[in-house]
Image (cartoon, helix red, strand yellow):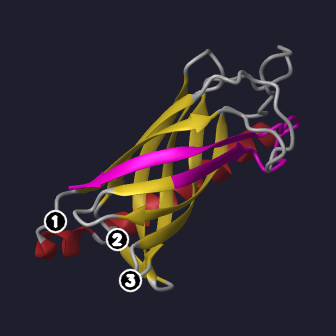
Amino acid sequence: MKSTVTTRVAVSLAALGWLGAALTVPALADDNRPFIDEARIGLLAHDVPNLWSGFSIETRRPDFNAELIFSPRIDFLGGIVRPVVGGSYNSAGGTSKAYVDARWEYQTSLGVFFGLGVGAAVHNGYIDPVSMDHKALGSRVLFHLPAEIGYRFAGGQTLSLYFEHDSNAHLAHYNEGLDDLGIRYGIKF
């Protein structure tokens, strides 16, 4: 029962983010911007201990991360909220995931930016504790909470430190959570 609630809540949050971004599509035509605003790729340490989830049992092999940031936007608290779709693939058989987020990003006049997001991730890991080398994540669909800080160079390229946390927020029986941390490179279209 809790797993079903987690799935519904996470999917609802992601859908709200996409709906909000979709409402801005008419403004997109006026700006003559491409539908995809930016692409980012990175290398992340997988299941980093002593962060939000607290402990690590999965592989130490890295994750390859890629995402697309779309142009539709909503101005909010001095920054912009945009829809994002992406994924993190573990290079050694650990938990991998695909996600959709509503991402708020603020950019300073000095080129420094930071962002926070909320969304849903679908993963290929274990739900119950059936393996000593994989976390019991409790639900197939998890909350995806990213945070990023970086620098935007002239020409729109970025270099950033990226963190992502995935869990079911204790809405399912098991909730061991997963934290990834690494660096990313981005390019604006």
Q: Is residue 58 left or right of residue 10?
A: right
Badge 1 or badge 2: first in the primary sequence: 1
Residue 62: percent from left, percent from top: 59, 28
Where disc 2 sits, the SS reads loop
Point out which mark residue 33 bears: 1
Locate the N terminus by quadrant: top right
**Where does label 3 land, which residue?**
109
**Residue 118 picture location, percent across and down:** 59, 58
Sequence-wise, the earlier of marks 1 and 3 is: 1
Q: State how far apart marks 2 and 3 are (Cα).
A: 19 Å
Q: Amino acid at mark 2?
A: Arg
Secondary structure, mark 3, is: loop
Classify 10 Å Cα crowding around label 1: few (below 14), some (14-19), many (20 and above).
few
Q: Residue at x 30, y 57 (%)?
A: 157
Which residue sits at x=82%, y=23%? 128
Amino acid at dot 3: Ser
Q: Which region is colored magenta? A: 161-189
Residue 162 within the segment the image draws in magenta:
yes
Where residue 86 sits: x, y (%)? 44, 42
Q: Is residue 65 left or right of residue 180?
A: left
Q: Quadrant of residue 140?
A: top right
